[in-house]
């Protein structure tokens, strides 16, 4: 019986971690978390969930997908939170989502380069490389723990997350409104890569123009992966550096490779 890792990723970091774990534990397929309903998840030996942390929580769209997955009693499940600033309440979110499913849950966190471009630009390349190198070492270590079915303790919210929790909740409630204000600049070449990448199908095409609705998950895929840097936002300052994981590319279908 093989294993499956479901990932949710905007800039490619969670996908890159998933690829690293896949290589180490073997006999494993990767699949987008939002397509988990297409799989008989309870039949797999090991099930993994890898996701980013948005304002100290699991993205709601990802958490909803996990909630809807059927798992068998005693199934081995691991969760990895890819975080830039704080892992926050992300692993607590997962525990609560899986609390009634009686699985063997392993909890992990891996730091990745922060990339919420509406608030700050990408870190310098050398610092990105440093963080990703440390992440690679963690991937190797975590893979061993997964194969050993090593017990892990609860990963609790850190102090930063607890201090800013009320602010983060307010900000998350504004995701849809904030997301509706993205726009395409004149250098847009109408490749529509942003449309293909959007996990909530929030970007539509009207008379050749791109329109952002109010279902944005704030994954930043549209703005970070645009090959022309043509996607922008009123909160986006001109000189902010973009970021995508250097080990990941997007194919013509809008899928990570």
Image: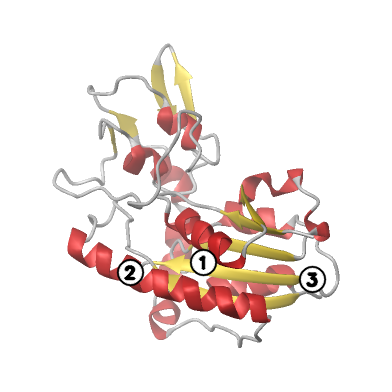
Label 1 Cα crowd, 10 Å radius (few <14 / some 14-19 / many 20+): many
Residue hosting label 2: 133
Closer to the camera, 11 or 63? 11
Quarter the N terminus occupies? bottom right
| Dot placed on the residue nearer the N-terminal end, 2 or 3 | 3
Say the numbered circle drawn on residue 181: none
**Circle nearer the viewer, 2 or 1:** 2
Residue 224 appears in which quarter of the rendering?
top left
Helix, strand, or loop for circle 2?
helix
| Dot placed on the residue nearer the N-terminal end, 2 or 1 | 1
Label 3 Cα crowd, 10 Å radius (few <14 / some 14-19 / many 20+): some
Identify the residue shown where x is 77% and y is 56%. 41
| Dot placed on the residue nearer the N-terminal end, 3 or 1 | 1
Say the numbered circle drawn on residue 75: 3
Residue hosting label 1: 57
Helix, strand, or loop for circle 3?
loop
């Amino acid at each position: 019986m093989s294993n499956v890792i479901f990932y949710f990723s905007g800039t490619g970091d969670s996908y890159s971690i998933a690829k690293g774990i896949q290589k180490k534990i073997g006999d494993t397929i990767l699949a987008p978390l939002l397509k988990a309903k297409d799989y008989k998840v309870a039949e797999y030996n090991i099930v993994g969930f890898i996701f980013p942390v948005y304002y100290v929580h699991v993205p709601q769209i990802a958490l909803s997908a996990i909630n809807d997955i059927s798992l068998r009693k005693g199934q081995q499940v691991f969760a990895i939170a890819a975080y830039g600033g704080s892992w926050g309440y992300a692993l607590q979110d997962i525990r609560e989502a899986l609390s009634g499913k009686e699985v063997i849950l392993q909890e992990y966190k891996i730091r990745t380069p922060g990339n919420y471009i509406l608030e700050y630009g990408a870190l310098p390349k050398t610092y990105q490389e440093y963080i990703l190198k440390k992440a690679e070492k963690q991937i190797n270590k975590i893979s061993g723990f997964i194969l050993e079915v090593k017990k892990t303790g609860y990963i609790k919210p850190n102090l930063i997350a607890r201090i800013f929790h009320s602010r983060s909740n307010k900000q998350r409630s504004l995701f849809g409104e904030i997301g509706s204000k993205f726009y395409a600049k004149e250098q847009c070449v109408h490749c529509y890569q942003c449309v293909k990448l959007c996990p909530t199908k929030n970007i539509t095409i009207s008379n050749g123009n791109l329109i952002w609705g109010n279902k944005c998950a704030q994954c930043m895929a549209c703005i970070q992966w645009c090959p022309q840097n043509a996607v922008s936002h009123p909160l986006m300052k001109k000189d902010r550096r973009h970021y995508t994981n250097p080990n990941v590319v997007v194919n013509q279908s809008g899928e990570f490779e």
